[in-house]
Image (cartoon, rainbow, N blue to C red):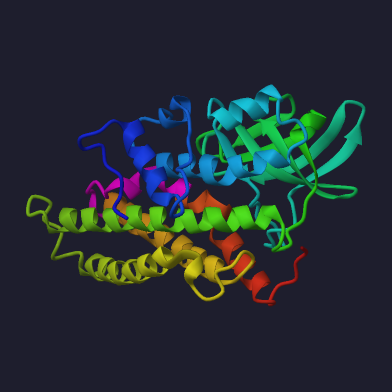
Amino acid sequence: MTAPTLAGSSRGDTLRRLLAELAPVGAPAAEVSEAVLAAGPRVGLPDALAVLEHACGVRPLLDLLAGAGHPTVAAVRAGDLPCALALFTPDATLALPVPGVRARSGPDGFVLDGRYRYGSPAGAALLVAEAADGPRLCLLRHDEPGVRTTGPDGWGWAELTGVTVDPALVSGPVSWHPAGPLLAVVDAYAWAYAPVAVAHAAATVAQLRRELADPAVGVLAASQYLAHELTRLDIELALLSSAARFGPRLRGGEAGGTAVVAVLTACATLTHRTAQVAADFATELGVPGGAAADPAWRVAVQAAFGGRRMVEGELARRMGLLAGRC
């Protein structure tokens, strides 16, 4: 898959084509409203991942919530309220089934405390909270009382203090068992994410090569270490792209298997390295550094699925090297 561009089409058309390419053979493409498609100033990796997360990560799980007709659920389902999938919060365990948010019963519903990480500046988040009878999905708007969003740009992390959630926006107890819907959706979203992130990273490396070779810049002779790193990235991204295209057909590619998290771990590492090299271009050499030099690009790849450490921890858990619950 090539990185989306605006050539010859509107931003919305480009993202619709992206979602159509990601749809399984014979299945309809995920639909999102103009409000989601129009979010952000341009088509780039942060925009593509925000739309992808909303369509492939959040919407398939909305049916698990108690109130299908609740206005917030309807707004998220229609795409009028962009929503992030906030299931991946790193902590000491680095285990996906261990939530960073706790739920207790209150007079008007569940009361949430804790924090979670999310990967786009969305207006709501779908998260897992630990309740007395097990983990539950909760849909939470970021403008609710008691929600404080933090991060370099004012988003990316949310801290919850005594936040009451309408019972209609809470699911019954859910499980991370491979046979359940939660892990199946997460893995399907990861398979959709990998080729998009790799395509953008490969396009960024190509742009960095053009900038490095530009005679007007005059830094090529002094930057052989960067040229060498770009070559390594080229090779590794090409190999990862081939693996990502196979998707669940890879051995161990079933829900709860190791293949998807192994691909995701490699993807998190390579996109992080791409962003770091782009930052070197901008800070050490004074050249633009391509799309990945944009702080929003770096945040997008570092926040997805909880970041590199979280993804590595989940791979270790699935391999039986790290304790974790189902």
Q: What span is colored magenta in the figure?
A: 284-300
Q: Relative to residue 72, is residue 6 depicted above or below? A: below
- The secondary structure that most of the magenta stretch takes on is helix
Query: Does residue 155 appear left or right of residue 269 in this picture?
Result: right
Can residue 83 be seen here?
yes
Q: Where is residue 207 in the image (x, y as percent from the top left)?
A: 22, 53
Number of numbered discs? 0
Q: Relative to residue 94, is residue 251 depicted above or below? A: below
Residue 39 picture quarter? top left
Residue 325 picture quarter? bottom right
Q: Is residue 286 magenta?
A: yes
Task: Give the residue furthest to the front.
Answer: 26
Can residue 296 be seen here?
no
Q: Does the magenta stretch include residue 26?
A: no
Q: Position of residue 216 (x, y in %)?
A: 8, 50
Q: Say which residue appears at 70% left-offset and 73% top-offset.
A: 322
Q: Position of residue 326 (x, y in %)?
A: 77, 63
Q: Say which residue appears at 75% left-offset and 32% top-offset.
A: 169
Q: Position of residue 309 (x, y in %)?
A: 58, 62
Q: Say which residue appears at 13% left-offset and 65% top-offset.
A: 221
